[in-house]
Amino acid sequence: MFHASVRAAARRLAAVTAGVIMTSVATIGSAALGASAPATPLVDAGWLNDRAGDENVVVLDIRSPLAGSSKEDYVKGHVPGAVYAEYPGAWRTTRDGVAGVLPSVEKLEAYLSELGVSDDKTVVIVSTGTSSLDFGAAARVYWTFKVLGHDNVSILDGGHAAWVADGNRPLETGDVKPVGDLFVAEFRPELDISTPEVEKLVADKPEQTVLLDARPEAFFLGKKRHPAAAAHGRLPGAVNLDHDSFFVAGSGKLKDGEALQSAVPADLKDKSLDIVSYCNTGHWAATDWFVMSELLGYENVRMYDESMVGWTHDPKRIVDSDRTRLDDLRDWFDSLGS
């Protein structure tokens, strides 16, 4: 994984050597359309509508049961040309007994190539657009592209809901079969952090590092836990910034820039802090990572992919918790009624 640049160079050379004749016509056509459209972390529906039919823009519709949607909804109507790429689907996997982690670079390269992604194309991620939980799916996919070295990626602000809010925008029905391309990753370890690295941070307690817990307070305090986590609680010394703090209440829309900055606690205003965003499985954490790194301009933000499910996989790792015996009794009584 960490020799991606060497592997990438070799694959690019092989692709050029093997495919130059087969792809010459397509390459000329693509060049005539110009380079991929410049993208910002968030784009609106008007921006996407203006690029309808642009072969250099790949639209990925990630709607799924996680957001109360499905491929059936996609087939009934989607952004024209959008390819279905359900989340979590191939975006996440189980490794060494820890669920929800990033698949291998090789598997992601193959998957994205099948979806028609290549290094010089703009990718726009379309979620359902109905909740902060749903936005986390888009943020997680966005982080995946960034950690793989693909910068020209955006999230459709407001997702599919924003697209259909204007009844004049077209919808395409049926299933779009993607035209495969070649995606080659340049893995960026500076955006990711492993469990052994987190263990070192917990042990050393570096002054400039913040372990940022993106979960709702009940999880942070240890009153609740993810079913796949082996213990209640948080990383030792962590601070809480609930991902939901960044959203307009009851919606899947982020607040505006000034309100986003106001949602960050005073002791986290220093944008040179070394921030490690985590949650239960690296989903809510992706939103905190996205807002702080991509929208607010923090310089050093990493995401802990394995998060609390991975951390508690080894019972020897300590957690901080405000859980009481009363919480244990309450959960026991609740289990009797379930």
Image (tube, rainbow, N blue to C red):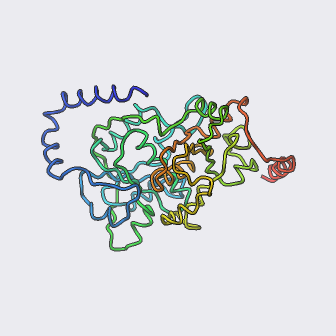
Nearer to me, 253 or 332: 253
From the top left corner, tell me how far across and down residue 224 is, in percent.
73, 49
Q: Residue at x 19, y 28 (%)?
A: 18
Nearer to me, 57 or 150: 150
Q: Residue at x 31, y 67 (%)?
A: 170
From the top left corner, tell me how far across and down residue 180 is, in percent.
28, 41
From the top left corner, tell me how far across and down residue 102 is, in percent.
50, 37
The answer to which quarter of the image holds residue 149 is top left
Q: Residue at x 65, y 36 (%)?
A: 205
Q: How many marks?
A: 0
Q: Quadrant of the N terminus?
A: top left
Question: In the visual, does 81 lie left or right of 32?
Answer: right
Nearer to me, 84 or 312: 312
The answer to which quarter of the image holds residue 79 is bottom left
From the top left corner, tell me how far across and down residue 59 is, in percent.
34, 53
Question: In the visual, does 314 lie left or right of 111?
Answer: right
